[in-house]
Amino acid sequence: MTEPPLDPSPEQAQRLLERELLRPEYHRHDVLQQLMDWISRFVDGTVRAASGTPPLSAFFAMVAFLLLALGLTWLLSRARRTARAERSRAVVAEHEVLTAAELRLRAERALAEGRNGDAVVDGFRALAVRQVERGRLDDLPGATAHEVAAAVGAAHPPARDRVTRTAAVFDEVRYGDRPATPEQAAEVLRLDDALAGRP
């Protein structure tokens, strides 16, 4: 077998490199096997290092590692739960298609029947949908009460504080399971009237 030239041309160098990389020793392990080998080496090294330390130190190190793993697991689950909750905090459900008048009627009926929480929820939804219908608010399916309040407050600056307070009541009732008072429910409807230009 002849020796390769000491100064190969680019084409010769590429052929030599391809031939070298085709050798079986480069393909003995797949990526998963390499990962398993690395984990095995890491665990073996950790066990060897721990065997040279006093038992009490090794115990505390294991407890600290376990607490760290549990903390990370808890944080990840909480982050996932928070993301799901934010997605479900929409003022108007995306699958629900009702007009402002229909929502307002439901709110008035709930208030008359003493279901103050339902009156607050449907009243605030009616307020939001009415602003969309009148072109004062972009149709944002899945918008939260805070987002609706910010947009409505920008469109009606004199009512900004009332809208913000009403959005907070909506969140407390809808997501905080707090009971609403008849006055809070009536205030949502009065705010809807004021924004709609009704006396």
Image (cartoon, grey):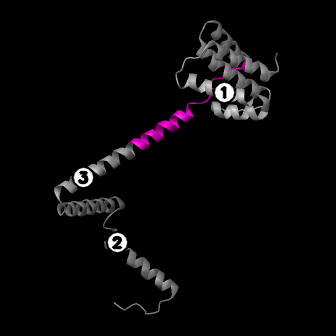
Q: Is residue 68 above or below residue 186?
A: below
Q: Which residue is mark 2?
A: 26
Quadrant where the C terminus sits is top right
In primary-sequence order, the first of circles 1 and 3 is 3
Residue for point 52% across, 85% down: 10
Residue 58 rendering spot, x and y as whole percentages: 21, 56
- Labels 3, 2: front one: 3
Q: Which residue is mark 3?
A: 60
Residue for point 38% across, 74% down: 22
Residue for point 42% across, 40% down: 77
In primary-sequence order, the first of circles 1 and 2 is 2
**Residue 18: which quarter of the image?**
bottom left
* Residues at discs 1 and 2 in contact (Cβ within 8 Å): no
Left or right, 21 with reference to 52:
right
Residue 36 rendering spot, x and y as whole percentages: 30, 59
Assess whether residue 89 is covered by the magenta stretch. yes
* Residues at discs 3 and 2 in contact (Cβ within 8 Å): no
Left or right, 136 with reference to 126:
right
Q: Is residue 7 above or below residue 23?
A: below
Residue 71 rendering spot, x and y as whole percentages: 37, 45
- Labels 1, 2: front one: 1
Q: Nearer the viewer, residue 134 or 157?
A: 157
Secondary element under disc 2, as helix, strand or loop, is helix
Secondary element under disc 3, as helix, strand or loop, is helix
Quadrant where the N terminus sits is bottom left
Labelled disc at residue 165: 1
Q: Which amino acid is tagged 2?
A: Tyr
Residue 2 rendering spot, x and y as whole percentages: 36, 92
Packing grade of label 3 (10 A; few <14, some 14-19, many >=20) is: few
Q: Which residues are magenta?
A: 74-100
